Image (cartoon, rainbow, N blue to C red):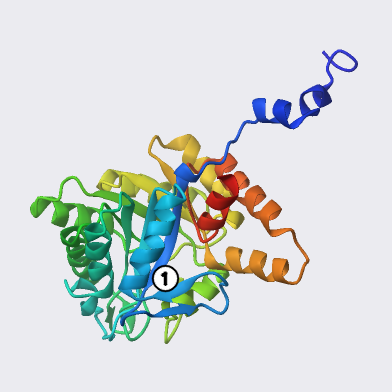
Amino acid sequence: MSFPAQRPRRLRRSEALRGLVRETRLSAAGLIYPMFVCPGTKVRKEVSSMPGVFQQSVDQIVEECREVEELGIPGVILFGLPESKDPRGTISTSAQGVVQRAIEEIRKANLKLLVITDVCLCEYTDHGHCGVIENGEVANDATLQVLAVQALSHARAGADIVAPSDMMDGRVGAIREMLDEHKFGEIAILAYAAKYCSGFYGPFREAADSAPQFGDRRSYQMDPGNVREALKEVALDIEEGADMVMVKPALPYLDVIRRVREEFDVPVGAYNVSGEYAMVKAAAQKGWLDEKRVVMEILTGIQRAGAGIILTYHAKDVAGWMK
Ligand SMILES: [Zn+2]
């Protein structure tokens, strides 16, 4: 079975042949585009470390959502930059909040886009942590109620899927219970199940204005060295009612994506995060990398590792290239 009977190069001779035998086919149908909603009208402010990504007021969000839908991308995930912050992030639960208003306007625009919302407190707390603080620590159980009420407010506004990213223990169960109690049994949960404490979130903190004002997130986000623990987190989230799970970031955790894909039978997503995006953009701007080529290679790699859903700031570019 070896040379000369087997010549793998036979199947690489033309694009038609390579396409025929390609094992991983990237498609816009698996992409989700992240967006940042801010107060005001006609606001469209580029995030300096993330060229092509903007903080936008609700009216602008709706405009870009039209573009996203036309490109064949099935959904967006919304992050909010609120008008004000407080220690408990209470504004995150308001029906008048930026995210809630954005959902309503996207719905009014009659778009078929799936609207996913990030559920967390870090964008809404003045201390920048993902939970409420008690005795100088991020208090797990006290945070669950705020998260559940926030998720409920997103569902009321018209979200299709809520995506808790806080990494508190028990939050998927708390959110599921709150949604079901209020007759939102059809709203799905995409859990950031294995979210690592990563340096690759740097540019996001500028985009979402959510850097912690003291300490760091190591007491709730996962340690980069762990994969067995990721499987435990995923198992718990599914047990609590998660419909889909996610690994975040993507590139340094491809083995985690693979393990999760192999061990669980739910849709698996990966978040190709801000730092991963910024590295490519910066190198491409300097002419050091061929942007289109490396982006396609990166997303193919994430899908090949096992992620059927990829949340990525490259989504619009990729969908455009593939049209
Ligand atoms: Zn957070």
Using the image, determine if residue 102 lies above or below residue 2: below
- The answer to whether one can see residue 187 in this image is yes
- Which amino acid is tagged 1? Ser
Question: What is the crowding at mark 1: few (fewer than 14 residues within 10 Å), some, or many (at least 20)?
Answer: few
Q: Position of residue 199 (x, y in %)?
A: 57, 71
Locate residue 13 relative to residue 104 in the image: left or right: right
Using the image, determine if residue 266 lies above or below residue 60: above
Q: Quadrant of the C terminus?
A: top right
| Residue ID at (67%, 55%) | 292
Q: Position of residue 234 (x, y in %)?
A: 39, 48
Of residue 101 and residue 207, the one placed in the foreground of this image is 101
Disc 1: which residue: 219
Q: Quadrant of residue 265?
A: top left
Using the image, determine if residue 196 lies above or below residue 297: below
Q: Residue furthest right?
A: 4
Q: Position of residue 40 (x, y in %)?
A: 31, 82
Q: Quadrant of residue 252?
A: bottom right
